[in-house]
Image: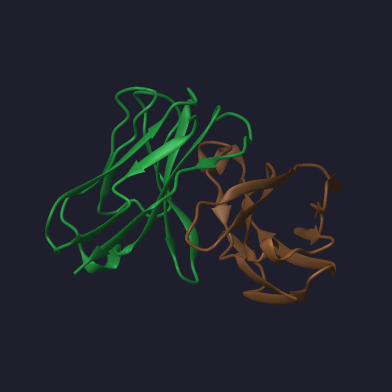
Amino acid sequence: IAGITQAPTSQILAAGRRMTLRCTQDMRHNAMYWYRQDLGLGLRLIHYSNTAGTTGKGEVPDGYSVSRANTDDFPLTLASAVPSQTSVYFCASSEQFDKSYEQYFGPGTRLTVT
Amino acid sequence: GQNIDQPTEMTATEGAIVQINCTYQTSGFNGLFWYQQHAGEAPTFLSYNVLDGLEEKGRFSSFLSRSKGYSYLLLKELQMKDSASYLCAVSPSLRFSGGYNKLIFGAGTRLAVHP
């Protein structure tokens, strides 16, 4: 089934632990994105990648890192989790970065940092 | 700064018409998107406007006025399944965003459709 998958679906994590959220798409889209969604704040861009091998910072990048080794995968790492990183995380992709294309979203990862 | 405003909540009756407004102030403009998000699910694309005017797609229509920094999403013949959050998002200018697809999202409008 074409689309975006994310893992895990949900996770409870102790503060200070390291965590990687996985994202894989099979649509051969060049651009990928990580958002967090918090009540009352809407979706906020954490990091993005315009194409394999490149990444960039979004609106709220602090405490997060990403890599884009190939077209399909775009993992998000929390090096040392803090409670303020409790959120729902969505991965998304779009065909290209140089035009306004619709973004396709994964099902999300609900992360709780205690 | 970048700012997108939309009402927090709206209610409507099944079969009716509802209009969800969105106003934006961004450093530039390369298009406006509307997404639908059911509770606990991922956002899904509804519409895209880059030129002034109305775009119609079935029961949903979206309008844009660039000079006023204003858009609305019109939902006709409301159904219970239309109960969801509706997210307005703007693509700012390339110069400031580093890419057309670095979207700025509003907080969303939660629509409840009642029988």
| Residue B106 located left or right of residue A110 | right
Give the colour scheme shown.
by chain
Q: Residue at x 14, y 51 (%)?
A: A18
Tell me how many marks there are. 0
Quarter where residue B76 is shown: bottom right
The C terminus of chain A lies in quadrant: bottom left
Residue nearest the viewer, comparing A105 with A35: A105
| Residue A87 located left or right of residue A3 | left
Q: Residue at x 50, y 51 (%)?
A: B42
Residue nearest the viewer, comparing A36 with B17: B17
Extreme-right residue of the structure? B53
Q: Is residue B37 above or below residue A7?
A: below
Residue nearest the viewer, comparing B44 with B79: B79
Quarter where residue B16 is shown: bottom right
Residue B107 location (% of width, % of height): 56, 65
Q: Residue at x 63, y 31 (%)?
A: A99
Extreme-front residue of the structure? B115
Q: Colour of chain A?
A: green
Residue B79 location (% of width, % of height): 75, 63
Q: Is residue B34 above or below residue A53?
A: below
Quarter where residue B26 is shown: bottom right
Residue A19 location (% of width, % of height): 19, 49
Q: Colour of chain B?
A: brown
Residue B27 location (% of width, % of height): 62, 51
Q: Is residue B15 above or below residue B52?
A: below
